Image: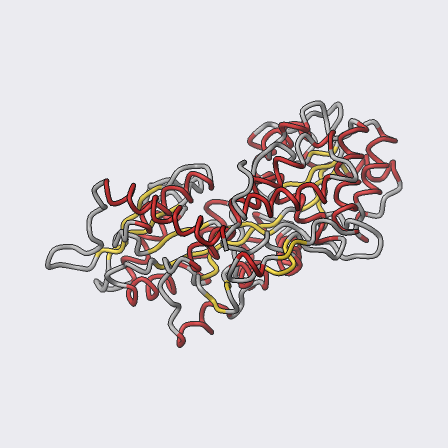
């Protein structure tokens, strides 16, 4: 019960901060066309209405509305953590300008539980779930209800040097395990690019490893702290710890594994002297030619590695869910706009313009998409198997505690899963600080 009180105090404090500052302008034009404010995350398109990103979708959907609404965009910070802080302050202050919000899926349960999201209209649920990859629906659901709209989805693939895999005798078409690629990297003297810095990307990797062993970081999220149950101290948790420790201590994770994020891992893979394997998002396909990589023809891709021989791969799920704010003056129009924003037409445009994969399965059969992304079918298949991060209103504390106990990766041992579970529960109960 202590944490429930603490959580409410935290929200109240943020509300006080938000109310002390001027709220954003109301989300309608005076006496004219209703204005919908869309808080977008950085996606490469910025605020350019012709840049191929969310700002361009806002322009096109405004035109297609026939004057029913006008969508304006506001760019949120680069970091998902900073995005959460900004949005939370605005929601806590009852900001009516939050008509549409591009939201990192792990934060959807927190905002939904706090009552900050407008209910999805019953007659639109089928529209927002049909033709969507399953992982995107799961990520937009809280307490068995769809609370946001699947917008774009993301997943990690295993990228590899074909010559290295062949020399190691690996059958990449059949899929591989972490043990296999670690052994191959050691044998061939190459590296495996991973994300193990103390940041959100490390939680993504840990979650995928545990899920790939048939486990869950959070076995029961529950609406209240008393219901929360963790699955870290388990065989699956041990399997994840063993993989991370072996990659770190053997050196195949590279010299900077403890501070490695997506960019560091990409740079490691792009080094022709030690390039072997890389787990990363599909954006790297466009990065290779942009970074003048001269061995592109030697790069292959396949499903994210399985944690062991017995389980199926559980690729990470990323992307963005589209939420409608509970304090919006035009929730009906906002959901109408969401229909346009997440349509097959707009998701195709968005994937071609930014490289961010669609949540609509049909997009992956589009000839233009297949031409630009020859691994489109693999991305779609990966998204069907992808596993979102733990869904809980306490996610921020859970992720931060997990990152702390599993860092540095070279220090991970058989006690790490249990100790991280103990820290998470102590933090949630208000007994320890991060």
* Viewer-proximal residue among 76 and 271: 76
The image shows residue 417, relative to residue 385, as above or below, that is above
* Viewer-proximal residue among 175 and 194: 194
Left or right of 269 in this view: 326: left
| Residue drawn at 23 percent across, 64 percent down | 68
| Residue drawn at 85 percent across, 39 percent down | 166
| Residue drawn at 61 percent across, 34 percent down | 288
Which part of the image, by quadrant, shows the C terminus?
A: top right
Q: Quadrant of residue 244?
A: top right
| Residue drawn at 70 percent across, 37 percent down | 278
Residue 269 x %, y %: 69, 31
Left or right of 37 in this view: 425: right
Residue 130 x %, y %: 51, 70
- The outermost residue toward the bottom is 123
The image shows residue 408, relative to residue 3, as above or below, that is above
Residue 23 x %, y %: 22, 46
Q: Quadrant of residue 281?
A: top right
Asked which colour scheme the image uses, the reply is secondary structure
């Amino acid at each position: 019960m202590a944490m429930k009180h603490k959580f409410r105090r935290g929200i109240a404090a943020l509300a006080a901060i938000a109310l002390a500052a001027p709220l954003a302008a109301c989300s309608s034009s005076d006496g004219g066309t209703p204005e919908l404010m869309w808080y977008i995350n950085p996606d490469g398109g910025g605020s350019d209405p012709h840049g191929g990103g969310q700002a361009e979708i806002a322009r096109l959907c405004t035109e297609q509305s026939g004057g029913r609404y006008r969508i304006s965009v506001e760019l949120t910070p680069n970091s998902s953590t900073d995005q959460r802080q900004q949005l939370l302050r605005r929601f806590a202050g009852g900001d009516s300008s939050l008509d549409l919000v591009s939201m990192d899926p792990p934060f959807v349960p927190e905002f939904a539980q706090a009552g900050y999201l407008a209910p999805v209209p019953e007659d639109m649920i089928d529209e927002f779930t049909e033709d969507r990859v399953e992982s995107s629906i799961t990520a937009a659901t809280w307490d068995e209800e769809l609370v946001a709209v699947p917008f774009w989805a993301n997943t990690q693939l295993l990228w590899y040097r074909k010559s290295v895999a062949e020399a190691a005798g690996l059958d990449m078409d059949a899929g591989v395990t972490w043990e296999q690629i670690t052994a191959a990297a050691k044998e061939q003297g190459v590296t495996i690019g991973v994300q193990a810095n103390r940041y959100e990307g490390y939680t993504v990797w840990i979650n995928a490893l545990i899920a790939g062993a048939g486990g869950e970081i959070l076995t029961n999220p529950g609406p209240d702290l008393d219901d929360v149950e963790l699955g870290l101290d388990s065989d699956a948790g041990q399997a994840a710890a063993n993989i991370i420790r072996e990659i770190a201590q053997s050196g195949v994770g590279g010299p900077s594994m403890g501070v490695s994020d997506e960019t560091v891992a990409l740079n490691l893979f792009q080094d022709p002297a030690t390039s072997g394997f890389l787990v990363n998002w599909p954006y790297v396909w466009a990065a290779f030619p942009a970074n003048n990589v001269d061995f592109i023809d030697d790069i292959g891709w396949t499903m994210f590695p399985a944690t062991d021989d017995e389980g199926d791969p559980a690729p990470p799920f990323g992307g963005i869910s589209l939420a409608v704010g509970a304090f919006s003056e035009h929730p009906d129009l906002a959901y109408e706009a969401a229909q346009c924003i997440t349509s097959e037409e707009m998701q195709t445009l968005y994937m071609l313009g930014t490289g961010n994969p669609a949540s609509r399965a049909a997009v992956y059969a589009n000839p233009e998409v297949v031409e630009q992304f020859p691994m489109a079918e693999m991305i779609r298949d990966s998204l069907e198997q992808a596993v979102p991060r733990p869904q809980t209103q306490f996610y921020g504390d859970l992720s931060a505690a997990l990152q702390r106990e599993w860092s540095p990766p070279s220090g991970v041992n058989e006690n790490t899963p249990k100790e991280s579970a103990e820290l998470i529960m102590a933090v949630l109960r208000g007994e320890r600080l991060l």
